[in-house]
Image (cartoon, coloured by chain):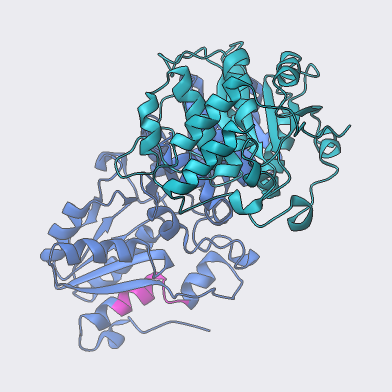
Chain colours: A blue, B cyan
């Protein structure tokens, strides 16, 4: 997904002289082609996120469109005030390409796991927050950001994520995509969790439960209309995200439903409000916290009060 | 070299007039007074003699960019911008009042202001980007940024200094309003900066020190920019916090005031005239 994003930025830069790439001491060889073909628009700066965001703002004030890439936690926690003041307050078209959203950096521990990045960015006026599901969708996202006048936060997955998006569904920032119909529950998911939602929905279907899946790639601005319409038609709303339960997609959906006076029950599947204090892999951490497809299916079946859910192959598989 | 400001020299009429405009801005009873008074001659010389700007066309592409990174010194900049005709002088008495154009930190919506600053450590990194952009555009325009001495406590300043040096931005001039006092007290006690000129030299800047209230010396210093081809420049302007108001000079309690009454404003005007 990261490679798709960087390739998309390279392609954008080739056809639009306003596009710049700025990295913060990324791995050796990143975008070498960009660097050799467009050296005046390729910047590899130091481990200095605050200055990089400020510098990007100065460049954007002069009409450039900087795409800034580093690890998600450093773009959100480290230089929050620069993002808020330099970018959002000034409404500048800087794009934040956030590597390792969610639990991708599980082996590296809590300093590197971005489990509250969506909440942090969502809180800022003028910010757009996007979490693509897979590499092809990432390409569509990057292309869609070119002419957005304000800052955009784009959350990367691990890479090699299963491809579940389709160009046939179209893509527009702020427009949720219905991936699967269903009447018994609706799952709103974002980022790489949409693939897991689809798998869970398939498992549920085998057990006679029809869950729809709506991919909310843009968490801000939220497609409130699509969310409210779908929620009003179902007995159960499920929100699924690779993020803490505070301030992410689940919170955004709750806000929208509460304001629309839609009282459908909401099952919020997310990480707890905690530094999770565990290593392993993205997959093992998701499993540990009940966020892998069989667990998702089981949680939904239980919430629906499906009799004998555990006997239908939906046994709770949480470990640890 | 350590150039201390000449405290005994009288202010000329123009410096007094610009300070009187600052006092006009105190009718809402508040403002960073000391922090603005130390800046007056720096801004006066920049706008009278150095910057290539068009008050009637503030967004003119070919302009020099000026960033007040110590955004709390805004009253001084507002006084100078109003005097230059960027906006009407009658905006000054409305400073910080509901619905006013001018608030307690510089704001990019104001004609002549490039960026909203005041959260410290922001304006300089933005200026680095602006200087880089100007060079990429092939323009001759220059970028100037004034930082406070207390502001140099912020790490982002030094991150940006490294970047300015790396990119050889000789179209960028940083000016330190070195008044030696921050909010709580003396810089030397709160967080010492010396040897300050050596620090900037070590970061790859061409450096000069100047009496920040000596108009002729400031003109000569700015006239010599860039100090080294291929390097950004740093002007360390030695100033007096509260300059021009005897009882406010070197007095940390005048860094910011939030309850200036009419009688105090009268005292400020009298003290200014007494220079």
What residue lies at 25% left-to-right and 46% top-to-bottom?
A175
Q: Say above or below: A285 vs B8.
A: below
What residue lies at 60% left-to-right and 61% top-to-bottom?
A112
Q: Say above or below: A116 vs A221.
A: below
What residue lies at 67% left-to-right and 35% top-to-bottom?
A44
Which of the two residues, A314 or B88, is positioned nearer the viewer here?
B88
User: On the picture, is B244 further left or further right than A76?
Assistant: right
Please indicate, yes or no, whether residue A66 appears anywhere in the rendered image: no
Which of the two residues, A103 or A295, is positioned nearer the viewer here?
A103
- Location of residue B41 in the rendering, given as x and y in whole percent from the top left corner: 64, 26
Please indicate, yes or no, whether residue B102 appears anywhere in the rendered image: yes
User: On the picture, is B94 further left or further right than B222?
Assistant: left
Q: Say above or below: B202 vs A309.
A: above
- Location of residue B74 in the rendering, given as x and y in whole percent from the top left corner: 51, 37
Residue A290 in magenta? yes
| Corner quadrant of residue A276 | bottom right
User: On the picture, is A236 further left or further right than A128?
Assistant: left
**From this viewpoint, which residue is outermost toward the right?**
B1
- Location of residue A266 in the rendering, given as x and y in whole percent from the top left corner: 24, 73
Which of the two residues, B95 or A294, is positioned nearer the viewer here?
B95
**From this viewpoint, which residue is outermost toward the left?**
A233
Q: Say above or below: A315 vs B13.
A: below
Q: Looking at the image, how many numbered discs can be counted on the residues? A: 0
| Corner quadrant of residue A173 | top left
Query: Over which residues does the magenta segment extend?
Result: A289-299
Residue B215 in magenta? no
Prevailing secondary structure class for the magenta stretch in the rendered image: helix
- Location of residue A96 in the rendering, given as x and y in whole percent from the top left corner: 49, 43
């Amino acid at each position: 997904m990261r490679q798709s994003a960087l390739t998309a930025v390279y392609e954008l830069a080739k056809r639009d002289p306003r596009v710049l790439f700025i990295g913060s001491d990324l791995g050796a060889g990143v975008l070498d082609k960009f660097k050799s073909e467009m050296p005046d628009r390729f910047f590899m700066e130091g481990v200095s996120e605050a200055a990089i965001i400020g510098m990007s703002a100065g460049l954007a004030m002069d009409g450039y469109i900087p795409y800034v890439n580093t690890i998600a936690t450093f773009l959100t926690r480290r230089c929050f005030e620069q993002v808020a003041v330099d970018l959002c307050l000034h409404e500048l078209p800087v794009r934040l390409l956030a590597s390792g959203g969610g639990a991708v950096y599980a082996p590296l521990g809590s300093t590197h796991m971005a489990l509250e990045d969506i909440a942090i960015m969502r809180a800022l006026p003028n910010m757009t927050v996007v979490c693509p599901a897979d590499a092809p969708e990432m390409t569509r996202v990057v292309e869609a950001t070119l002419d957005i006048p304000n800052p955009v936060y784009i959350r990367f997955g691990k890479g090699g994520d299963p491809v579940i998006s389709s160009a046939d569904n179209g893509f527009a920032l702020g427009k949720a995509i219905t991936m699967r119909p269903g009447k018994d529950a609706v799952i709103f998911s974002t980022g790489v969790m949409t693939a897991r939602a689809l798998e869970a929905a398939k498992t549920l279907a085998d057990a006679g439960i029809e869950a729809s899946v709506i991919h909310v790639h843009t968490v801000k601005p939220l497609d409130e209309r699509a969310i409210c319409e779908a929620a009003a038609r179902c007995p159960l709303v499920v929100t699924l995200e690779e993020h803490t339960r505070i301030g992410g997609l689940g919170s955004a959906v709750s806000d929208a439903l509460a304001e629309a006076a839609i009282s459908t029950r909401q099952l919020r599947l997310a990480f707890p409000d905690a530094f999770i204090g565990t290593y392993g892999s993205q997959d093992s951490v998701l499993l540990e916290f009940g966020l892998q497809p069989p667990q998702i299916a089981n949680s939904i079946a239980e919430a629906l009060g499906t009799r004998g859910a555990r006997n239908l192959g939906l046994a709770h598989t949480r470990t640890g | 070299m350590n150039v201390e400001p000449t405290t005994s020299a009288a202010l000329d009429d123009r410096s007094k007039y610009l300070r009187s405009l600052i006092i006009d801005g105190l009718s809402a009873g508040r403002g960073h007074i000391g922090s603005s008074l130390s800046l007056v001659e720096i801004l006066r010389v920049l706008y009278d003699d150095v910057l290539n700007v068009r008050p009637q066309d503030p967004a003119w592409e070919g302009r020099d960019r000026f960033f007040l990174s110590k955004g709390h010194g805004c009253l001084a900049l507002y006084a100078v911008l109003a005097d230059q005709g960027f906006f009407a002088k009658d905006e000054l008495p409305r400073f910080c009042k509901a619905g006013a154009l001018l608030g307690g930190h510089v704001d990019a919506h104001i004609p002549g202001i490039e960026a909203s600053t005041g959260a410290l450590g922001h304006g300089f990194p933005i200026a680095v980007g602006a200087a880089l952009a100007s060079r990429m555009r092939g323009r001759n325009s220059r970028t100037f940024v004034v930082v406070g001495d207390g502001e140099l406590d912020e790490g982002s300043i030094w991150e940006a200094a490294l970047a300015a040096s790396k990119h050889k931005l000789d179209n960028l001039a940083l000016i330190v309003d070195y008044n030696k006092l921050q909010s709580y007290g003396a810089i030397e006690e709160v967080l010492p900066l010396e040897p300050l000129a050596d620090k900037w030299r070590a970061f790859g800047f061409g450096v000069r020190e100047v009496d920040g209230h000596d108009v002729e010396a400031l003109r000569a210093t700015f006239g010599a920019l860039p100090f080294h081809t291929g390097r950004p420049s740093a002007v360390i302007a030695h100033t007096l916090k509260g300059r021009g108001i005897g009882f406010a000079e070197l007095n940390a309690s005048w860094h910011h005031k939030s309850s200036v009454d009419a009688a105090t404003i009268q005292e400020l005007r009298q003290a200014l005239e007494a220079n």
